Amino acid sequence: MKFVSFSFLLLCIFQAVSSQPTTDPKEVAALSRIIEFWNLRNKLNITGDPCAQNATWAPETANPRVSCSCDATICHIIHLKVYALDVSGEIPIELFDLKELMDLNLGQNVLGGPIPAEIGQLSKMQYLSLGINNLTGTLPPELGNLTKLISLSFSSNNFNGPLPPQLGNLTSLQQLYIDSSGLSGPIPQELANLKSLQSLWASDNQFTGKFPEFIGTFTELRDLRLQGTSLEGPIPSSLRNLDKLDSLRIGDLGGADSSLDFLGNQTSLSILILRNSRISGQIPDEIGTFLKLQLLDLSFNKLTGNIPSSFQNFPLLRYMYLGNNGLSGEIPANIISSNLVSLDVSFNPLFGKLPLNFARVGLSMNLVGTSIDSNSLLDSQASGLLQCVRQDSECSNSNVTASFAIKCGGSSQTSASGIEYDDESEILGAASLYTSSNNEWAVSNAGNFISNPNGPVYTARTESQIIGTLDSELYKTARVSASSLRYYGLGMENGKYTVELHFAEIEMGDPYSWRGLGRRLFDVYIQGDRVLRDFNVQAEAGGSKRALVKTFEASVNNTVMDVHFFWAGKGTCCIPYQGTYGPQVSAIRVSQASDGFGSGKRDKKRAGKIAWVAVGCAAAAVIMTSVFYLWWTKNSPTHMRIHTDSSRKG
């Protein structure tokens, strides 16, 4: 009887086990092949059924992750995550045997090659992330078959060609991240069908043509980013319909000018950036009613008229950038609200008194190039500089100089060739000015890194050795900026100068890991002339942590040298971490140019020193010879007196 009961129990257990659903064998084989192809066996060692209950690779926190959906008889793999594991190679064809996939995350790896057309077979896909990889080729139009997609990301890759118009079929799409992906050409009209979009990141692509009018129909948009493209204005008035926007970032437009008439209903905005967008006319008072604003950037445009008095009413605003416009009149007295930490109104024909609370602790302010009465500033040197760098005036500096050298973002150093680079380790703010102790140069910064996990830091540092230089220490620190970084030589003698700019990419690594897939691009202007456009230090130097020196000639006509590093919206934003972009410079040296005969004053002085050393050596030789002759004549039959004169000063 006991034996019968035990047998019955075993039979029940067997039936229970055998009745549990198992994974589709084709999917099991495909997953095994994928694991081998990407060399993941040490991280995802699945020897049994991948959809087994309580598997360690199934929870949402697992990485790699494989999770399934099962019915009474069979299981299908619906989630596959291989995230930030530096997986290399191409996308294996077996991946597309997982036809029930709903969520595929392959982001932050070093995958290469094209996206296979077979991706269109994954018709149940809802979330597809391929961002931050090395993928190439054109985007397959078969992506348009994934009509259930809610989120699509292929940012930060190396694709080429246009956006496929078939993406307009993705009418359920809420998030589209395509920034820094290498795309070019016009934005297809078919994308007007994406009425459910809430986030659209499309910056840093070579998109051409007019700014799309249809974006104004995306009334669900919360986050729109279109910086660093080749799109042309004007910004369409239809954007006035986007009243749910929380973040609007448009910049670096060409073509026709725009006005700010499309603003008025976006009272939910916390970030408004319209930098370098050829915006003209006056600033509408309505912007002062955007009470949720935390960052406002209207810099590098053609705005005229007064700063609206309504700009005194922002309760949450922390950063305000109005620099490099044609704004006139006086700054509103109460523009420095309780939360404001940075105010930039530089290079505007503004005048009058400083606003109230200008000396508040924690506030940084940039007034360079204005006529604002700055006598009350704590930094009297900076006060004088404000008049120095105005376009219609000259510096009156008692210390006339013909050269200067700066260690950008670091402490003073002497190079292997004996050049002394001044300390420039001052803590700069998001809108600030610093003048050197000798009043020979100054530096100003405007711009802040949004969401940078390191906080408001405007220097970079590495402990690694720098290749290709005898002055490795000179390149281990650098000054960085999120927007505009300018160095000024003050009280310079008028004439021709040689400008040496020293660079090394020390934040982005070489592309052996996803952390090295970033691209930093910026422009450089000297005396207002652009000498470098879309400059990529890492690419030109042949890798990261390699020294690169660029040399230019420029003329000084008004006693001021202006070296300007400017971010034009291009390059990746978030590799290896959020807020990794913008200009980065290690050191600057400016010296009078030679006319071919060593006529530079610094060279003349050096040549003079060498000449005097030679004279001294010759004199020493004469003296030694005389001593020897004296000793010799002392032992000779006749004695001859030797007369010597003291050394003469030339």
Image (tube, rainbow, N blue to C red):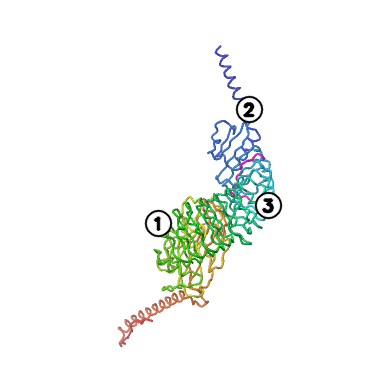
Quadrant location of the N terminus in the rendered image: top right
What amino acid does circle 2 point to?
Ala
Q: Looking at the picture, tell me which residue is in the foreground, 339 or 593.
A: 339
Percent position (x, y) of residue 174?
A: 61, 45
Residue 38 within the magenta-colored segment of the rendering: no
Disc on the earlier residue, 1 or 2 = 2
- As shown in the figure, which amino acid type bears the numbered disc 3? Pro
Q: Is residue 344 left or right of residue 146?
A: left
- Specify which label sits upstream in the sequence, 1 or 3: 3
Disc 1/disc 3 C-alpha distance (Å): 50 Å
Secondary structure category for the residue under label 3: loop
Element class at badge 1: loop
Q: Which residue is mark 1?
A: 361
- Secondary structure at badge 2 equals loop
Any mark on residue 188, and which? 3
Q: Of the residues under marks 2 and 3, which one precedes in the sequence?
A: 2
Range of the magenta residues? 123-137
Q: CA distance from mark 2 to mark 3?
A: 45 Å
- Label 2: few (<14), some (14–19) or many (≥20) C-alpha neighbours in 10 Å: few
Q: Which residue is mark 2?
A: 72
**Amino acid carrying mark 1 in the image:** Val
Does the magenta segment cover residue 128? yes
Front in this rendered view, residue 415 or 565:
565
Q: Residue at x 65, y 55 (%)?
A: 184
Does residue 25 appear anywhere in the picture? yes
Q: Nearer the viewer, mark 2 or mark 3?
A: 3
Query: Residue 74, located in which quarter of the rendered image?
Result: top right
Q: Position of residue 185 (x, y in %)?
A: 67, 56
